[in-house]
Amino acid sequence: MTERLYYDDARLTSFTANVTQIEEVSRAGGQSMWRVALDRSAFYPHSGGQPNDRGTLTASSRSGAALIAPIEDVQEDDSGEVWHYTLKPLVPGTEVRGEIDRARRLDHMQQHSGQHLLSAALFAVAQAPTVSFHLGENLSTIDLAVEQLSRQTLEQAEDFANAVIAEDRPMSTYRTSREQAEAWLAAGQMRKLPPRSGDLRIVEIAGDPHPLDRNACGGTHVASTGAIGGLHVRGLEKVRQGWRVEFVCGQRAVRTARQDYAALCELSRTLSEPFERLSERLRSMQSDAKQSAKMIDSLTGELATYRAGQMVQSAPVENGRLLVRQRFAAHEQGVAKQLAAKISGHQKAAALFACDGDDAQPATILLAANADLAIDCGAMLREAVTAAGGRGGGSKTMAQGSVPMAALEETLQNLKRAVVEMTSNA
Ligand SMILES: [Zn+2]
């Protein structure tokens, strides 16, 4: 089983070890993925909510040539072996030098230690117990089993955590017996214990007279709270079991604040307003947009009335009936419907409109008529479009249907004949 060097020194990012096993785990496109086990490793495997380390294993030959194997992933198996995933095979027995990506490791140490601290802070200010956590690529989250959690409480916890960071309290790791841990649990000096038996690795944030926080944890942590470098709470979201809090620590908090500042600057430049007036300005823009939309609606209605009047006036009169026919583009369907309705409001007037379709969409036919023409638009249109392989229907004064583009012209001719015939008889 691999000796885990990070247990005793989380700042160790360079070490030597011997390759004990290698296995091919997959092969695709002539490229094999291998997993390598070492007698000792400082690489942290993905576990306990903390992501794995990355880095390299380097083997040197007697001639001095170096084989560098980048480590893509690190996993542990049920037996406790740590496996290093790489595209370069390494021979068992070879001595290798491991180099861990320091920035990534420090970032994980800051987020993970920050999680311990924020959980302790939320318990201190709101008696809110943490039930689970997740350290993500950008944001980390903790889930709390509480009914209510306000922004204000969250800010109190954030202030509490940052005060502890400023105090730079020791954060120690040590091993203890199951019995001792159970005694602490009974005395309320620990909040939970993992189910497994045997000795436990404890992570503790110092406090007086009792530690501020004491947890059984196998992750990597900073040596004192100052190295967390600052904790910033972000989102607060209701989840099934309680509340989820998003947070960032250290350099990530700085990066996140930098991105927010850049976004605000961009918005401020675009709207030519200082930060403090952006909300007010956006609310006023929303209100203006609503007003404009209302005005557009009203003007569109007026324009349709006017256009419908003109169309009725220029339509040929036949047997005292006016039949307005027009073809519209596919995107004008809304306008066409509005016009057809307006035209059918005129005495003795009917509208027969077509809106083009395309290869994918069928054409649309609209038929509207004033009640004084005594046409059943719904029945007439349904019969015509059904005969052409389409479908449709509607009321006596307004109907809509669709037919394949190829059948459009013929259907329109049939409908025109039907309207003329009906109104001639009337
Ligand atoms: Zn931990």
Image (cartoon, rainbow, N blue to C red):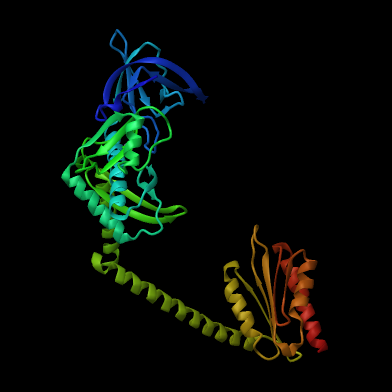
Between 192 and 120, which is closer to the camera in this rendering? 192
List x then y, in percent, for residue 269. 26, 63
List x then y, in percent, for residue 335. 57, 76
Side of 184 relative to 347 (left or right):
left
For the N terminus, give its image quadrant. Answer: top left
Please indicate, yes or no, whether residue 125 appears anywhere in the rendered image: yes
Residue ID at (43%, 34%): 195
Residue ID at (29%, 31%): 101
Q: Please, is residue 283 above or below residue 372 in the view?
A: above
User: In the figure, residue 360 lies in which quadrant?
Assistant: bottom right
List x then y, in percent, for residue 367. 70, 77
Between 252 and 306, which is closer to the camera in this rendering? 252
Side of 257 relative to 283 (left or right):
left
Q: Please, is residue 364 above or below residue 140 in the view?
A: below
Between 14 and 144, which is closer to the camera in this rendering? 144
Q: Residue furthest right?
A: 425
Residue ID at (38%, 44%): 133
Please indicate, yes or no, whether residue 263 appears anywhere in the rendered image: no
Q: Please, is residue 405 above or below residue 190 in the view?
A: below
